[in-house]
Amino acid sequence: MIIDTHAHVYLEDFDEDADLIIERAATENIDQILLPNIDMTSVERLLGLCDKHPQLYKPMIGLHPCYVKEDYEQQLIQLKTYLNREDLVAIGEIGIDLYWDKTFEKEQILAYRTQIEWSKEKSLPFVIHSRESLDLTISIVEEMQDGRLSGVFHCFNGTVEQAQRIMDVGFYMGIGGVVTFKNAGVDKVVSQLPMEYLVVETDAPYLSPVPFRGSRNEPSYVSKVIDKIAEVKELDRAEVCKLTTENARKLFSI
């Protein structure tokens, strides 16, 4: 079985074929799909999907860094009220994004730190978005790690040296469609990393793997990520499925 540890299938992109998404995921032996939140506008759709399909979909709660604006403190207050759900598997997705807009960089850092504190309070892992901010997001985890923090650097595309820092604080790396991109270089880094620190993800509807690059991503496509990891690690595909699923179950307590 396979766990897609990161997919936004509650978005409107999937409204027209929601049932087919589930069928195609089942065909590829996707056992569970973990759903990271974006902001207050997405939380009800996300939780509604988890309530409808509780065995398949598992929720996270968090404020995505791209949606940290002037009202971020109020959003955090509202989002925190959802943290008592028994089916919650993580705080997420949280982090820092300095690619699109640096206007709220200070607020992003404050929101990131606040939500890391939530993870301590609730004994939950957290899922980190780190676009153009990988060193910064790692440094904050290094600073705040007191033995109670766990989580995953979603959409990891860093260097071997950055991966080592992540492993040194006991965190995992989420490997998605970018590992299949010819010139991204992620495959070369992954080939040097131990399987003990890897989980797989799609980030659907974004970052579709080859040969679906450029089209909408979906959980069934995580099989292509598995195939590529097996290729670069020179492992049997079933072994990659087994190890990444074990890692996901351990990290998210599922």
Image (cartoon, grey):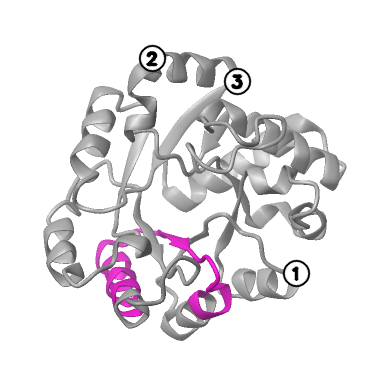
Please give the residue where the numbered disc 1 appears in the rendered image.
160
Amino acid type, mark 1? Val
Front in this rendered view, residue 23 or 117: 23
For residue 168, which quarter of the picture?
A: bottom right
User: Does residue 63 appear left or right of residue 133 in this picture?
Assistant: left
Instruction: Work out whether mark 1 precedes mark 3 in sequence or the reverse, and give the earlier one.
Output: 3
Q: Considering depth in this image, is 210 or 115 the residue closer to the camera?
A: 210
In 3D space, how far apart are the residues under numbered discs 2 and 1 (Cα atoms)? 39 Å
Q: Residues within 10 Å of mark 3 (few under 14, many from 20)?
A: some
> Which numbered dot is residue 86?
none
Q: Which residue is mark 2?
A: 19
* First of labels 2, 1 by sequence position: 2
Secondary structure of residue under mark 3: loop
Residue contact at pointers 3 and 2, CB within 8 angstroms: no
Q: Nearer the viewer, residue 13 or 221?
A: 13
Q: Is residue 11 left or right of residue 205?
A: left
The amino acid pointed to by label 2 is Asp
Q: Nearer the viewer, residue 182 or 248?
A: 182
Mark in the foreground, 3 or 2? 2
Question: Mark 2 against mark 1, which lies toward the viewer?
Answer: 2
Q: Position of residue 44 (x, y in %)?
A: 18, 39
Residue at which label 3 appears: 28
> Magenta segment, which residues?
109-137
Provide residue 59's location: percent of width, then percent of height.
31, 42
- As drawn, the residue found furthest toward the bottom would be 143
- Residue for point 29% across, 68% down: 115
Q: Secondary structure at mark 2?
A: helix
| Image quadrant in which you'd find residue 158 | bottom right
Looking at the rendered structure, the kind of residue marked 3 is: Glu
